[in-house]
Amino acid sequence: FTINKRLSQRFTAVGSFYWTHTTSSIQSIASSGAITNGVATNPDQAINNGQSYSQWVSHVDASYDGPWGIRISPVLRMQQGAPLTPTYAVTGLNIGTFFLPLAPTGQFYNPDLYVFDLRFQKNLKFKERYRTELFFDVFNLFNSNTANTESAVVSQKSTTVDSQKVFYEGFGSPTAILPPRVFRIGARFTF
């Protein structure tokens, strides 16, 4: 679903929403919980190998031609977290480490992601054929620190806090976090 507001009164916007549904079998599962679709190739892969889940992604961006010829362009990205397949790492086998799925894919998800970016742009014209674009970008304006991915392996992890060993659940612990707020200044010269 997409909606488009054409340029009028110095303002334009586009919004979109996508929804998908996946139903298939899992061929293999990595330690990250990443799945490969297909048909199970051995009896171990036939356990909890079905997956049926939905995901949504939405995107809104706009442009406003403000005073002094400065264009302001906000972008809001929203998406549902990817599905997690809880796994248990079975070791000591002749086949190496085997990740046994403990629940169907789609029962657990990574956190939803909401990111707001912003751009300020000024176009300058020299003579008739030379142009310069000056821009200032702000990525992750609200400094969201959402986990992009979480661990899918059911385990007990540990860390040291104030010289004491602390244990915590590995499943659902962050493995990658959205980068912090970033500023970028740039220019583009065309002739």
Image (cartoon, rainbow, N blue to C red):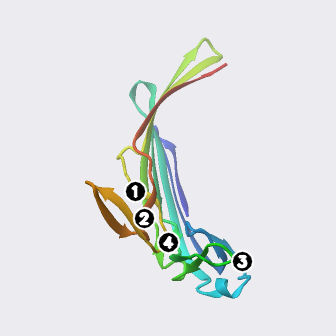
Counting residues from the start of the chain, the first of labels 1 and 3 encountered is: 3
- Residue denoted by label 4: 153
- Of circles 4 and 2, the one toward us is 4
Marks 4/2: CA–CA distance: 16 Å
Q: Residues within 10 Å of mark 3 (few under 14, many from 20)?
A: few
Q: CA distance from mark 1 to mark 4?
A: 19 Å
165 relative to 140, above or below: below
Which numbered disc, 4 or 2, marks the residue that appears first in the sequence?
2
Q: Work out how far the residue at label 1 is from the one at label 3, CA to CA, in angstroms.
A: 31 Å
Task: In the rendered structure, find residue 38 and report the number of the disc placed on it.
Answer: 3
Question: Which one is closest to the eye, mark 4 or mark 3?
Answer: 4
Q: Nearer the viewer, mark 1 or mark 4?
A: 4
Distance of label 2 from label 3 (alpha carbons): 26 Å
Under tag 1, what secondary structure? loop
Of 44 and 134, the residue lying toward us? 44
Q: 122 left or right of 51?
A: left
On screen, residue 159 above or below 47: above
Element carrying mark 4: loop
User: Which residue position is annotated with label 2?
Assistant: 111
Dots 2 and 1: beta carbons under 8 Å?
yes
Coordinates of residue 151 in the picture (x, y in percent)? 48, 66
Residue 190 % position (x, y): 64, 22
Check disc 2 and report its element: helix, strand or loop. Answer: loop
Q: Badge 1 is on which residue?
A: 146
Q: Position of residue 5 (x, y in %)?
A: 50, 50
